[in-house]
Image (spheres, rainbow, N blue to C red):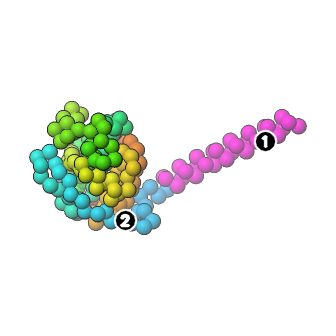
Amino acid sequence: MKRRVAIAFTAVAIAAAGAGIYLSYRQTSAAPFARLAAPKTLPDLRFVDATGRTLSLADFRGKVVLLNIWATWCAPCRVEMPSLERLHKKLAGTDFRIVAVSVDGDPFHLEDSQAPPGIMAFANGLGLTFDILHDPSGAVRAAYQTYAVPESFVIDREGIIVKKVIGAAEWDGPVTETLIERLTHGQ
């Protein structure tokens, strides 16, 4: 009798796990491009590039933007940077931009942070050619309620967040590429 109960319990557990996997796959693959339930417009913060020029997200209005919040001391950030570069190269010449904002030196994490020359040395060492900006004030993390790095946002032409990713991702995969292509083509 105990064996039958154990077998039945195992069968129910396997069926539940299979159903959960199926439903999570079905949910993400059936409507992977749906907007967030309550679209959120991002605040227009200012950042500094390697030349000292001040830029804001408003400077990218009308383009689809992947905003990546990262730091040089973050190992997962280093891991995902090559896939961001591959995506940048794949979609070069379109209305898509990658804007990577380093939070090195912000009040949330001061140790191991780099000054702008160190940030650019990091980016150059990885061969990054997309926009690298810097926010040492912590304003970007406070405004977008990010508590770890990397965190990324896909933003449509109107400045509305359509996707948020917490943690490192393989950005040059077909799902993200299709999402960006649909957004740049107005779908």
Residue 168, quarter of picture: top left
Q: Callout 1: 10 Å neighbours few (<14), some, many (20+)? A: few
In space, the residues marked 2 and 1 are separated at their CA atoms by: 47 Å
Q: Is residue 79 above or below residue 152?
A: above
The amino acid type, in three-letter code, at marker 2 is Lys
Residue located 17% across and 51% down the image: 48
Quadrant where the image shows the C terminus: bottom left
The part of the chain drawn in magenta is 1-29
In the picture, the disc for residue 103 is none
Give the percent coordinates (x, y) of residue 86. Answer: 28, 40
Residue identifier under label 2: 40
Residue 74, quarter of picture: top left
Give the percent coordinates (x, y) of residue 50. Answer: 14, 45
Give the percent coordinates (x, y) of residue 17. Answer: 64, 44
Instruction: Decide whether residue 9 is among the magenta residues.
Output: yes
The answer, for residue 169, to whether it is visible in the render is no
For marks 2 and 1, give the one nearer the viewer.
2
Quadrant where the image shows the N terminus: top right
Residue located 82% across and 40% down the image: 5
* Left or right, residue 39 beside residue 65: right
Q: Is residue 90 above or below residue 79?
A: below
Residue identifier under label 1: 8
Q: Is residue 113 above or below residue 27?
A: above
The amino acid type, in three-letter code, at marker 1 is Ala
Instruction: Decide whether residue 55 is among the magenta residues.
Output: no
Q: Main secondary structure of the magenta part?
A: helix
* Left or right, residue 75 beside residue 135: right
